[in-house]
Amino acid sequence: MSKPSSSEDILGKKYDRCLADLLVKSGIGFGVGVVASVIFFRRRTWPIALSTGFGAGAAYADCDRSFNPARIPGTRVLSPPEAASLPDKNSN
């Protein structure tokens, strides 16, 4: 049988995943920015900063979703008394 993991271990794994995701997505954004800067934008620096920021922002959104899954857009979390008072969709 597997040993139950403590909350600190779970939190540590989430932080590790978030950090790894940040490094990967920011690195990919940096690479795309360098390529775009060299090919399309006459070696300007703003495409590098912009695409790195896009990668970091995507990693931040994924990390936020990992730590707070109830904040997924389009979902509504109901408390038990409120959920019981709503009409059932299948009762018609």
Image: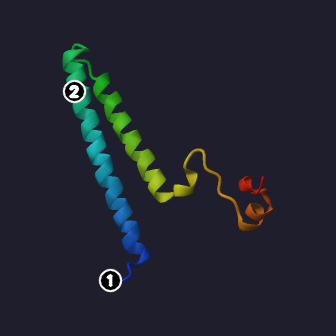
- SS at mark 1 in the image: loop
Identify the disc placed on residue 62: none
Q: Is residue 42 left or right of residue 81?
A: left
- SS at mark 2 in the image: helix
The Cα atoms of the two marked residues, 1 and 2, are separated by 46 Å
Task: Give neighbour class at mark 2: few <14, some 14-19, many 20+ (Cα, 10 Å).
Answer: many
Q: Is residue 23 left or right of residue 74?
A: left
Q: Is residue 45 left or right of residue 74?
A: left
Placement of 71 over or under 26, stated as above or below: below
N-terminal label among 1 and 2: 1
Label 1, on which residue? 2
Q: Nearer the viewer, residue 12 or 43?
A: 12
Which quadrant holds residue 58? Answer: top left
The residue sitting at 39% across, 70% down in the picture is: 10
Placement of 6 over or under 71, stated as above or below: below
Q: Position of residue 89 (x, y in %)?
A: 73, 53
Please name which of the two marks, 1 or 2, marks the residue nearer to the observer: 1
The residue sitting at 37% across, 34% down in the picture is: 54
Indicate the amino acid at tag 2. Answer: Val
Label 2, on which residue? 34
